[in-house]
Structures are given as structure tokens and as C-alpha cells.
Amino acid sequence: MTELSFDIAHLLAGGLVLVSFLLLYQDRIYALLNVYAAHAAVLAASVAWQAYVQDAPHLFITAAIALVFKAIVVPTALHRIVARLGIHRQIETVGGVGPTMLAGMALVALSLVVMLKVTGDADPLAREDLAFALSVVLLGLLMMVTRRNAVGQVVGFMSMENGLVLAATGAKGMPLVVEISVAFSILIAFIVIGIFLFRIRERFDTVDVAALDRFRGERQ
Amino acid sequence: MAALILGLLIQALQMLVVLATAPLLTGFVRKVKARALGRRGPPLIQPYRDLLRLTRKEAVVAENASWLFRATPYLVFAGTWVAASLVPTFASGLMFSWSADLIAIIALLGSARFFLALAGMDVGTAFGGIGSSREVTFASLAEPAMIMIVFTLALIAGSTQLSTIAAIFGQSDVGLRVSLGLALIALIMVAIAENGRIPVDNPATHLELTMVHEAMVLEYSGRHLAALELAASLKLLLYMSVIACVFVPWGIEAATPAAILLGLGAWAAKLAAGGALLALFETSIAKMRVFRVSNFMGAGLMLGLLATLLLFVSRSLL
Amino acid sequence: MTGFTPEIAILVIPLVAAAVLAVIPGYRAGALLNVLACAATLLTAVSLFFIERSPPGTYFLVDDLNVVFIVLTTFVAFTTSIFSASYIGHELETGRLTPAYLRFYHAMYQLLMFGMNLSLTANNIGLMWVAIELATLTTVLMVGIYRTHEALEAAWKYFILGSVGIALALFGTILVYMAALPVIGEGIDAMVWTTLISRAAGFEPALLELAFVFLLLGYGTKAGLVPLHAWLPDAHAEGPTPISAVLSGLLLNVALYAVLRFKLLLAANPGTFAAGPLMAVLGLASLSFASFMLYRRRDIKRMFAYSSIEHMGIITFAFGMGGPLANFAGLLHMVMHSLTKSGIFFAVGHIAQAKGTQKIADIRGLTESHPLLGWGLVLGVVAIAGLPPLGIFMSEFLVVSSTFARQPLLAIPLVAGLLIGFGALVLRLQGLAFGAPSGASAPVKASYVPMFIHFALVLVAGLFLPRPLVEWFEHIARLLG
Amino acid sequence: MLTGVVLASVAAQLVVAVISVASGRRHAASPFVYAASAIICIAPMIALLSGAERGAVTLPLGLPWIGAHFAVDALSAFFLVVVNLGGAAAGLFAVGYGRHEAAPHRVLPFYPAFLAGMNLVVVANDAFTFLVSWEFMSLTSWALVMAHHRERNNAFAGYVYLVMAGAGTLALLLAFGLLAGAGGDYTFDAIRQNQLSPVFAGLVLTLALLGAGSKAGVVPLHVWLPLAHPAAPSHVSALMSGVMTKVAVYGFIRIVFDLMGTGQWWWATLVLALGAITAVMGVLYALMQHDLKRLLAYHTVENIGIIFIGLGLALAFRANGMTLAAALALTAALFHVLNHSLFKSLLFFGAGAVLTATGERDMEHLGGLIHRMPATAFLFLAGCVAISALPPLNGFVSEWLTFQAILLSPDLQQWDLRMLAPAAGALLALSAALAAACFVKAYGVTFLGRPRTPVAAGATETDRFSLAAMGIFAGICLIAGIFPGVVMDALAPVTQSLVGGRLPAQSGVAWLSIVPIEAGRSSYNGLLVFLFIAASTTLAASAIHRFASRAVRRAPPWDCGFPDPSPATQYTAASFAQPIRRIYGTIVFQAREHVQMPPPGSLAPAHFAATLRDLVWDELYQPVAGAVGIAADRLNRFQFLTVRRYLALVFGALVILLLLVALWPP
């Protein structure tokens, strides 16, 4: 492929990582949702570019899903939920934003090292793509782990899943990508609905440990 | 054939002789003791008289005594008698000496003690219990000590047969050994304890808190008591004979009638000496507290073990 | 593919049954249909032994490895359906479930069967991934079916952790595709398992190992390996007991089966060595951790859930050790554990219904109050604790002795873990089965047939393994290297 | 063919077990079940005595590619006799005893299965079958221990027992893993071919000591034994104490003497030291007991120690190539195996009879039973004499042989063995003397004196079957005591196969005495001793009765003039053992006596209390249990984390593995 297309793909993938960092940085819930929308948009762009480069039209579906479902529907739904459930606007983080960012840096470095080490003979685009995808995944996980707030964790999960889609699309000619992205969208829908149904306000596990014990009789 | 008859004769003679001599030895010890204390003391044959008188009396038996109580005296007597009759006294090479070696003889005395201790508990009185409990406690130290002594002798003589040991020690190429000295001291200590002599026990006492053997036989009377008394004398005789035939094993290796007479003389001399020594020893010291006896016996056991170990070492040196 | 192909049938039957069950009212009819569908699936699965196998296609595959799993799965599914038929009636009486939920329950049950059969027959790593996700989602819904606070909480925990696991597994799958790309070229072929394994020798080893890391973590979450196990105990404890039986007996196996498939892939590549040690370490961790956790359990179902973690650890360790003996033992242990553990959950379900509680402290003297149930539980726990003459003893014997002969140091934590778990199980068993009985002693009206069928099978297997089964196992053991 | 007969008997026992399950809670079934199992036990012995040819049998069971191998060689033949003799007698005893069983449905099914398991262990000829049978034996006996599950102590006993059994089996499993190697051929024949490196061989020995030793009750692995044996019904206690521990000894001999080949000499030091310690500790524990059955159980520990002393000596001699001496030591050990199985079963039968007659196991509540149950008392006395190693009964012979073996130890090459052997001898003698003391106490307090409680006063003689069983064993004890040569000759093939030598044939010796080494060295003639004692007893008694008085007057006891009517003034078990407790207990059990004397003039009663500590339990087992508990508590926190923390675990695992991949040298 041409140098230019390579650079663009590279740029988009890198952009995704950058936006992941922005996600990590946010501590306001609405801002977080907006940034996530941006995250999804960048993903859509990157997927579309891949579709164009690999001229794999079915990937455009994935891009569309990313754009419509993730960049528009889910964020707005979450906006609603936050408003409806009266969730705190502030996102509690574990160990502050700064250290989290540092950890994120380390993770990106780690994923680059790992990927470039193990993918010796894959073509460069795929290598870069995979490396960035892995960093996005790890950053997403990191976010899930460091956010005490349910919405924050959902966003983390979704960004992680974006990373997966990036990887899947980056893998040349990989079949089932569309199906997989659909499956994931369903998963996310479940989560969002779950949050709404189970009235999960602050955390994934509303019940505190003591209550758990009482319920389960795990401690006398 | 003649040898067989002779052997049987000697064996029978031996059994009768020990039976006949045992009370005499007891009487002799008492006599010497009395003299040492400046009394005239009873005549030598007093023990025979006592035995006769006892056997003629009716036996008074506690109401709740069981058959075991009445059988025990005879069992004890028999056990001790058999043991004593297997020890070479005036003649080694006894007909049946091989039927029980030294270990078996100790075990025979052990069975006698076992039944005596049971009889002590049979009537269900406090004193009987005291006696049995103390008896078995002391025995629990005396028996291993005795076994250690047997080890020492057996390792030197290469046999646990008393007659063989005596024969080998008789040919005086064994020489003097540290182990033998230790063994001798240990053996004497054990003998004192086993026969209930001062300082371990006092055969004459009826001071309840100190008595051991007497407490067990407290309920006995008449012929039963007689059997037990006789057994006690036999035991004393047995131990003295053992010491004699092991440590002064002279004048017993013979089968001709003349030599047998000689052997009898030698044996009598040894017993007299032993009895006298015992009496003097008893008069010269006081009885110890019951719970110091365990230390006494423990010392005996240690000596025996030491003797054996030394022997193992020396054996490995040559 | 022309005519009757069982591997398709075992997928179609559950789907249709699920559709029908979703609409027909009346739980008796539903339960009956559920049993019938499972029976039909079982029969078709058994027919796999006899009829000519169709050659592996792009999407489906039947080989020595998965045929055993398929038959096991369908069999346990069948017995469990019988059990659940006699179980849910009581749930309806006590009002824990409504008819509507029962309809949903039965439909989900069949959907779960579909998902598991699909993931077992899948010859395409992507398809396998989708199938396992489907199975997970259905079980999530069933775990939460009681709608109690803790049931929902357990379902939610299961769901979140499961989703993360799914994500990791997908990344691993993508990496495998990437590894295959240079050798096989673009397109569906690079995801077809048979193709992959035939060409695996040429793949980039490092990439494969990285992929295996993700796959092990992803599918290992499903298999309940420590430290990814957190969802398992609560899901077992809070869901309906039939589902606990299916989870422990089947879903964990399916997840491990996926891991095994990829271990085969790595085994086929000479350059890789990481798979074995990784699995061995995770296995040991699970074994030791779970056996300690057994001591402080106060909920009977949660306790046996931890015992499942323990045994998954043993199996993973065995496969990690590798070698014909250990692999054989691992497979055997897998089968034995499925049968025993589901049998135990049958017993536990009836016990919990009879005593009206799941608290171990409130259940005592079962052998007096409910002799059949009590002795059944004793038998089951004796089996799961690895005592002869039941089957698990044989597999544990092979694992431990072969390990000790090769890696004496590894055997020490293994034995320690086994012993500690054993102590905990016996302790609880004595409390449950003996002593003065407590609580209600009214006889439960339930069919003990499934439970005793399972235990009888385990007993027979402990004494005598049929030749064909042994040959399959040996064949697979050789494949696993 | 012999092996076939044994397997058939095993199958028959299992069938009986199944039938008895069907019989349910009906008491009527129990005599038939016991009679059946007893008769089944006789079959292998008949086959053995009829000299049926021994062959190996392989069944298509167990490990698929190996199958289940069974064979009977000299060693297993001997132990078959021990097992089935005990089984038959226990069955006969239980025909009567079983009628008093409260919950027959908890005993009947497991009893025949237990016998079957023990038979299987003895004839198993590959590691897997051996372990399966071994653990099956433990499992069934555990079920029997739990038969009276309502008593809380029984639950504890059962728990400790099963866990120790599991640990032991794992130890044996590891041992077999080493013996068989990675190849996975677990047949004994294949194992015999393997040559182990010295280190591994030592490891196997240690594991065998752990596995078989824990089952046999070697100190400090004995803790389960005094708990479990008394908890079971008495005929089962008899089997567990008299027979199962012997099966454990069989396991040890099979592994160490047979499968491992001639070993290094230092093995002997380990076994010898353990045996000596076990013997003394066992009897000291026993002396401190006042529960009759527990006392007997501790004596099992003591006798196992004596057996292990013999085995250790045999190992030492074999390692030094002293074949004859090794044969002597092994003969002594095996002879004691037989003896102990006889008199320990007899004693447990007696304890069971007392239990059914009075409902009491605590000696302090008994007394005077010799009047109420004369026959039982007499037979129990025979058992006591036998176990106290007193001539002319059998217990003495085996200990005498052990002493003779010790006397050969100066010819050993190694210094420390030479030091250890006489020390072991001293300890052996000590334990023998203490055993005598202990049985004076047991018999005196239980059967002699005056009844301490109404139940003891109201006891009645036990049933015919129980008496028959006890009588048979008492008779065998006497016969084995006065004709020891027969047994020694019967043991010759075993020693021949295990240490490659045998004792000179005893059958030819004049007057039926036994001469283990040579006539000049040592000899013993139980028959003559017996005859002498019998003759002189009757002679003395009849003479006195004939020529002197035979009159008897019954009177109140004399008791130094202060007879006390209350039975409370009798010596109790505790007071009887007090001197021994003072002498030995102060160190071994840290025995402390606390006396509270009221001040002079006060009328308050004085209080005396003695406290004992079981150091083995407190210092060895408690810490382990505590450590497991602490670890469980620590880890239990992981049950109560938040989802976020669980995710953190997953994340951490992932990052660590990625780091590994990144840092791993390519």
C-alpha cells in the first residue's frame, strides 16, 4: 500500500490511543461520555479507512455500527440514565488521575514492546495496528480498574472493546469481524440496560461487603 | 541311659535341695542380723516352724476374694520354684537348664510378680492397691536393669544359658572387666529391690505407708501365706545362687557324685557368705523413702546399660 | 453435506426446542419437552459414535477430542433436565419462580445446550468464540432468574467478569489469526482449526504464545481458574441448582475444551513451550487457593462451587504437565468431575429443598433424616474427595504419581493442596451427614435416579474403564503431547 | 488355586455387604451376616493349609493398560492367615455381640466390606490395586467408626482418622510414583526391576514410614488410633487394632523389604529408633488411661513399636549381609504380628463383653467383675498374661526372639547401629515391664476388687458365641506359646524370600524346644516350662491340702484392722498409675499435680488435681491445624472483594504475563 495510506491508518490508530488517554484524564461524567463519543468516532474513521484500504466493503458496516451505535446511541442513553438516576457528576478515581496516566504510559510502552517483539514477520501496518489496539485494550482495562463509578467502568469496557474492533479490522481479511462487532454491541446494550434495570448508581456492586455476608450467611 | 537317669536325679535333687535350703537361708540372714544388732535372734530353723504352723492353720479368706486370690499363692510358689530349680546351684549342666535361659527365668519371676500384684488388688482394699502399685512400679525399672545385666553376661559368654555362662566364666580366661563390675553392682541392686530388702523395702515392717511386698500379702493367712513366704525365701536363694554361679563360678562344673558333694559344700559356703553380707548391709543402712527407690532402681538400670554399651564398644575394638 | 448429519442435528434440536419452549405454557409440558429434547440430542450425539463421520467442514468438526465432550455434555444435560423436572415443581410451590419465568428458564436451558454444542462442534475459532459468549449470556440470565438481591448481584458480577474474559479471548483469537496470516493467507481458512493445526508448524512461535496468554486468561475466566474465578462461587450459589450442576459439570469443561484446542495448536508448533508451564502454574494456584477457601464456607452450594475450582485446577495442572499419563489423567478427571459434581448438585438441590436452607450449619444428620439423600451425598463427597474405588481416585493417582516421578518439587504443593481440600470436605461432610438431625425431616418427593446413575457411572469407571474410551483418551493424550 | 479362592472370598464378602444393605435396620439379619462373613473368612485359610498352588491372577480392572494384578506369595500367605483368623473370630464374637448393636444398618454393610478390603490389600500385586484396596479399607473402617455418629467425640475421631488415612495414602502414592518411575508401569514385578538412586530410595523409605507407619500407629503418627479404635463397635475395634494395623505392617514390609531390594544400613537406624520410641511412648500413654478400650488401643501402639524394632533389626542385619540374624529378627517381628493380632483381638472382645454387660468403658466405674462374669474374666486374664510377655504364653516367645536378635547386633559394622541396638533393647525391656504394670492395673481395676457402681454390681456373663471366640483365641495363644517351633518353621519361607535366609528347622529339636541359632547359645522350651509350672502348682496345692489343713473361713477383709465398707476407698486406675506418672510422666507428659490443702482447722475438703499434656498433639498437630486455619482466614477475604477489585486481579494477571512475554529472552 502507499506511504500515505499507511500514515493515515497509523495516525487514526494513534489517535485512538490518544483519546483513550483523554478518557483516562476525565473526571467529569458528561465530559467523559463526550470523549467516549469521540473515541467511537475515531474508531469509526479508522475502520472506514481500513475498509477502504483493504477494499473490504463489509468493514463499512462495522464502521457504521461504531458511528451510529457507539458514538451516538449509547452516549445519549447514558446521558439519560445519569440524569434519571441522579448519578454523581464527579467520578471517583483510585489513586488520582496523575498516577493513572503514568500507569497508562507504562502500559502503552509495554504493549508496544510486546507486539513489536512477537510480530516479526507480519506487515508493518498490522504490527502498528495491533500494538495500538493492545494499548487501547489495556487502557480500557486500566480505566475499569481505576474508576469507582459504574458509568466510568462501562465507558472503560466500551473503549477496550473499541480496541478489539480496531485489532480485528487491522487484521487483514479477517472474517466474522462484522458478526463480532454486532455481538459486542449486543453485549454493551446488555450492560447499559443492566445498569438501568438494576439501578446501579455508584458502583458495579451496590451491596457493600457486610450486607453481602448477611445475605449469604458467609460470616456469622 | 544312665546319663539320662543321672541327669534326672540331679535335676530332682536340685529342686528338692533348693526347696529345703531356702528357709534356712532366710533364717540364717535373720540370725546374723539379730547378732549384728546384739540380739540372740530366733534359731536357724525358725522359718521351718513358721511354715509348718501356717500350713496347719485354717486359711482366712476375705468375703469378696475371688478364685484368683486363692490360686495365686500356689502359682507364685510354683513359678519361683521352677525358676530357682533351673539355676545351677551346686552343679551346672542341669538336665533341663536349656528349657529356660536367663531371660526366661527373669520372665518367670515376672509372672509370679504379676499374679501377686493382681492378688493384692483382688480384695479391694487400699493397702493391697498401694502394694501392687509400688511393686509394679519398681519392677518396671528392675526388669530392664536385669535384662541389661543379662545382655552384659550374654555378650561376654556368647550365650544366655545360665549353665553355659557359668561354665565359660568358670574357665577363668574371661578376666576382669569393667562391664562385669558394673553388672555385678547392678545385679546386687536389683536383687535387693526384688527381694524387698532394706533399703528398698523392709520384710519385717508392717508400717503401712512404707511397705510394698507386705502390703500385697496383707490379706493372706494360713497355708496361702506359707506358700508365699516360701516363695519369697526361694527368690532370695535364687538371686544369691545366680550371683554365685556367675561371679564365683567355682566348684559347680561336675557330674560325679564326689564332685557333687564338693559342689554342695562350695554352694553352702557361697550362700553363707552372701547371706552374712546381706545381713550386715541391711543393718548398716536405713530404709529410703518410697519415691527415692525409683532413683535407686534408675541408677541400677543406668549401670546395666552402661555395662552393655561398654561391652559393645570393647567388642568393636577387638 | 447430504442427509442426516448428527453434528448439525445436535444444534438444530435445541434451537427448535428453545423456540417451542418459549411459547408453550404450562411448566409440566415444558419440563417434559425439555427432557425429551435433551434425550433426542443425547441419542443423536451417541449416534456420532456409530455412523460415518462427515469430513471436517469450514464451520463444523467432529473428531476424537470433541466427540467425548459432546456425548458427555448431552448426557449430563439429559440427566440434569430430569433432575430439574423434579426440582422446579418445588420451586413453583414455594413461589420462588413463576410459570412465566419457568418458560423463560426452559427456553434458556435449551439455548444454553445449543451454545455449548456449537462451541464443541465448531471448527472455526471465531465461531467457537461466539458460541461460548452465547452460552455465557444464557447462563448469566439463568443465574439471575430468582431476582433476589444477591442473585442479581451474582449475575451482574458473572456478567462483567465474563465480558472482560470474552474480550481477552477475542484478542487472543485475533492474534492467532495474525499468526496464521503469513502462512495460510487471508480469509476464512486462517480461522479454520483443522487448517490451522495442519500448518501450525510454520507459525511465529512468539506470537502464538502471546495469543495463548490472552486465550488462557479469557477462556480461563470461564473455567474459573484463580485469579479469574471470582464469578464462579456466587453464580453457583445463587442460581437454580440445575444450572449450578450444568455450570460445574459442563460449562467449565467447554471453556477448558477451548483452552485445550489452542494448546493442541501450540503443541503442533515446535517453537513454543510456554503453554504447559502457564497452565501448570494456574492450575496449582487454583487448587491451593480453592482448597483453603473450602474451610470457611457456610453455604453448601458455594462450597461445592469452590471444589469445582479446585478440580478445574487439577485438570489444568495435569494438561500443563503434559505427557501421555498426565494428559490421560486430565481427560479422565474432566469426565469424572463432570459426572460427580453434577450428581452432587442433584443431591444438594434436593437437600436444600428438604431442609429449606443452604446454610451448612443448619443441615445436620442427613443420613438419619433422609437416608437416601444423606448416603448419596456421602458417596458423592467421597468420590469428589478422591477416595477409591470411585473414578476420581484413578485420575488423581495418575496425576500425582506421574508428576512426582518427573517433577518431585511440583508434586509437593499438589499433594498439599489435595490434602487440605480433602480435610475441608471431610470436615463438612461429617457435619452434614452425621450427628443429630436438624431441621425438617419430611421425605422429599424427588427422583434420585439421575444422582445415582451418575455415581454408579463414576463407581464403574473407578473399577473398570471400557476399552474404546481408553483408546480415545490415549489418542487425544498423544495429540496433546 | 489360592489367589482365586481369596478373590472369591472377597467377592462373597462384598455380596454379603450388599445383601445386608438390603436387610436394612432389622436386627434379625445381623447374626446371619456375621456368621456368613466368618465362614467366608475360613475358606482362604483352608485353601492355604490344603497347599493349593499359588498363582498370579490378572483381572481387566483398575488401570486400563495394566489391569488389576493379584498374587499370593509367602508373605501375603502369612498375612492372609492373620487377617482371616481375626476376621473369623470377630465374626463369631459378633454373632452374639451384634445383637446389642443399636444401629445395625450402620455396621452390617461395612463390616464385610472392611474384611474384603483387608484381604485385597494383602493379595494386591500392583501399586494401583494396592492403594485402592488400602484406601477402601480405610474408608470402610471410617464408616464403622462413624457407626455411633451421635457421640461428638466419635465425629472428631472419624475426622482425624480419615484425614490421617488420606495423608498416609498420598504418602504411599508418592512412594509408588518414585518406585515406578515416569514409565507408569505400576505392577510390582516391574517395580522390582527398577533401580532407585540412594537419595530416592531414602525418600521412598521415609514416605513408606509416613504412609504405612501412620496406619500402623507409629509415634508420632499414632494420634488417630486411640481415638478411632475405641469409637468403633468392639468387634470392629478388635479388627482395627488386631488386624488392620498388621495390614499396615504388611504394607511396610512389602515396600521396604520386597520392592526396594537390599537398602542402606542407615534405614535401620530410622526404623529402630522409631520402633523403640513407639514402644515406650505407647505403653506410657496406655498407663495414663482409664478408658478400657482406649488403653487397649494405646497398647496396640506399643506392640507396633515392638514389631518395628524387629523390622529395624532385620534391616540392619540384611544391610550387613548377616542373613541368619536378619532371618531371626524378621521371624521375631512376624511372630509378634501374629501374637498381637491374637491377644489384642481377645482383649478387645473382652472389653466388648464388659461394655455390653455394664455399658461402661471407664474402668473407674467398674470392678469386681470376676465374680459376675467369671468366664470372661478368666479369658481376659489369659490375654493380659499374653500381652504382658509372660511365659508360658505366646507374647513372651516373640519378645524373647527379639532379645536374641538384639544380642547378635555387636557383629554389626556400623557404630551407631551398635549403639542403638542395646538402647532399643533396654527400651523394649522397659516397655515390657510397663506393659505388665499396665495390665495389672487394667485387670485389677476392672475385674478385681469390689464393684464401684451399680451397673458393675449388676453385670451378667456374656453370651456363648462371644465366649467361644475369646476361648478359641486364648487357646491359640497358649498353643503358640508352648509350641513356638511350629510358627517359626511356618515363617521360614517368608524370611527365605525376604532376607534370603531362614532359621534352622525347629521341628527336629528334642523336647520340642526352640533353638534359633545354636543349642549352646540360647534355647527355650515353652512346653516344659508350662508343664513344670502346672505340675509344681498342683503338687504344692494337693500336698498342702492333703497333708495340712484345707479349711477355709470367709471373713471381712483385714486391711490392717481398718476395713472400709465403701468401694470408693479402693485403689483407682489413676491412683494405681500415680507412682509411674511421677517417675515418667513428669517429663513425657509434663504431668503436674496441684494440691489444695485447706488451712489447719478448716473443715473444707482438700483438692488434688493432676494435669497431663499430650506433647505430640500440642506441639505437632495443633500448629499445623492452626496454620491451615490462619491461611484459610486470610484467603477468605477474597470472597468479599468488589467487582472492581476482582477486575484488578484479572488485570494484574494479564499485565504480569505480558511482562513475562516482554522480558523473556527470545
Image (cartoon, coloured by chain):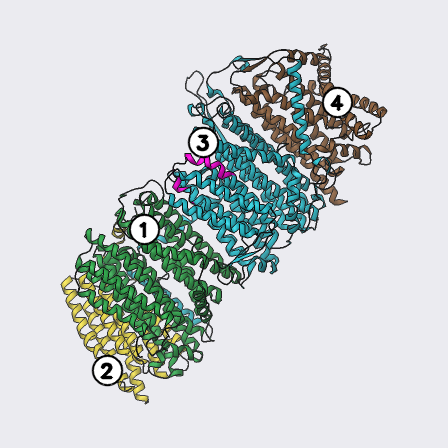
**Numbered disc in front, either 4 or 1:** 1
Q: Which residue is mark 4?
A: B274
Look at chain D in the picture and name its colour. cyan
Which three-letter amino acid code belongs to the residue tagged 1? Ile
Spatial separation of the CA atoms under disc 4 and disc 3 = 52 Å
Residue B13: give x, y in percent of width and height.
77, 23
Q: Which residue is mark 1?
A: C300
Q: Is residue D480 left or right of residue D232?
A: right
Residue B144: give x, y in percent of width and height.
64, 33
Look at chain B in the picture and name its colour. brown
Q: Which residue is mark 2?
A: A60
User: Label 2 near label 4: C-beta < 8 Å?
Assistant: no
**Numbered disc in front, either 3 or 1:** 3
Which three-letter amino acid code belongs to the residue tagged 3? Leu
Asked if both marks, 2 and 1, belong to the same chain, the answer given is: no
**Which mark identifies residue D355?**
3
**Protein chain holding label 3:** D
**Protein chain holding label 1:** C
